[in-house]
Amino acid sequence: MSYPNADISFPGLFGDWRFTLSPKLLDIGNGIYWYGVLIAAGLLIALWFCMKRAPRYGLTEDDVIDTVLWAIPFAIVGARVYYVLFYLDQFRLADGSIDWAETYRIWDGGLAIYGGILAAFLTAWLVCRKKQLSLWALADCCVAGFFIGQAIGRWGNFFNREAFGGMTELPWRMRLWISGTYYIDVHPTFLYESLWNVAGLLLLCLAVDKVRRFDGENTCFYFLWYGIGRFWIEGLRTDSLYLFHVTLFGERVRVSQALSLVMIVLTAVILLKNRSADPARMFVNRRLDGQATVLPDRSEERPIEDGPAEADRPAKTPAEDAAGGKASAEGAAEPADGGDNG
């Protein structure tokens, strides 16, 4: 449900001030909507941010650009297909057939973020296979961009007067003026999700990434954090997508809540399992001082009798230094085992 022409106010915060801006930025052709402009702005800022961070994960800026250029169009298609699939009745004609012309009108709204994320990951997987990149290192780099894009893009819902929550009397309630005298006070769920993503971005960059121990850890944090927030926020919304006619305890199951719960459990298990693992046996594709640091594959190494001079040898990784110190004490000179945990 949306009220694209309704005035908006926040009486508990800004008194009688009303927001009256149109959902359209420019009335050209079908119109240029704020919704699309904000999504595009979020994507560009996210891309720039991820490109700057790429060397930390053993990637180049071109790796990020190539993946994003392929992922964006498929993510948009995936987001729309996901929405149409679970809102199919909205696109039916009186005779029960599907109005296919309406299914592609994304400028009217109707994109499901989970569908976009799933399509983006599938596309990234194919690109990584082609370019022989680590999918999880790339994902760890890009999930910060997901937080940025979603934090900005959610404001498109504000301009469209959609994706709001149920009735509330909280001080930060959002008032939608349906007519000159009739209004409804609702949860500004777009704002909740935007702020939740900002908090997730700060935690990721200032804490999680600094102690990252394996490829995929940032990605797991993203799905865990976003899953928790989305599960909570989805329960407040009035326009949820439902899992067809499936019910649980007499209530219809919301698709986003079901998927969020799966993500929370799965990523929590992965994080707990890998946090207790030996870091020397885990592949961490990060960069230090601009150079990739990768734990070596011991199975391909052979003893070196007459090696190069010490000055000509490549710098050791922290894991190799630690392993070398242990080996020296035992009269051996082999590095620690390395492996890719996926």
Image (cartoon, helix red, strand yellow):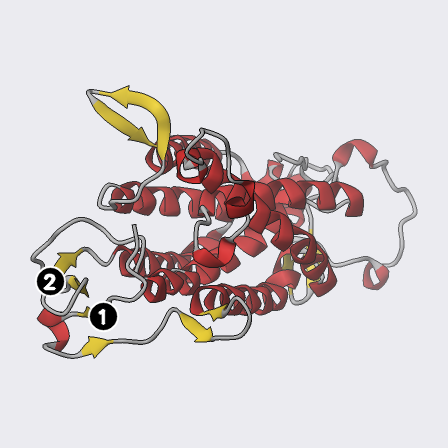
Asked which quadrant contains residue 295, the reply is: top right
- Label 1 or label 2, whichever lies nearer to me, is 2
Residue at the image point whose x is 49% and y is 63% from the top? 39
Q: Amino acid at mark 2?
A: Tyr
Residue 286 lies, in percent from the top left, at: 62, 54
Closer-to-camera residue (36/179): 179
Q: Which residue is mark 1?
A: 7
Closer-to-camera residue (125/36): 36
| Mark 1 residue element | strand
Residue 164 lies, in percent from the top left, at: 26, 54
Residue 128 falls left or right of residue 176: right
| Mark 2 residue element | loop
Residue 154 falls left or right of residue 166: right
Q: Are marks 1 and 2 in contact (CB under 8 Å)?
A: no
Do we see residue 65 in this rendering? yes
Residue 213 falls left or right of residue 138: left
**Residue extending furthest right?**
306
Residue 45 lies, in percent from the top left, at: 53, 69
Closer-to-camera residue (218/22): 22
Residue 230 falls left or right of residue 112: left
Residue at the image point whose x is 45% and y is 75% from the top? 25
* Disc 2 residue crowd, few under 14, some 14–19, many 20+, Cα 10 Å: few
Q: Amino acid at mark 1?
A: Asp
Q: Is residue 135 above or below residue 203?
A: above
* Disc 1 residue crowd, few under 14, some 14–19, many 20+, Cα 10 Å: many
Q: Which residue is mark 2?
A: 182
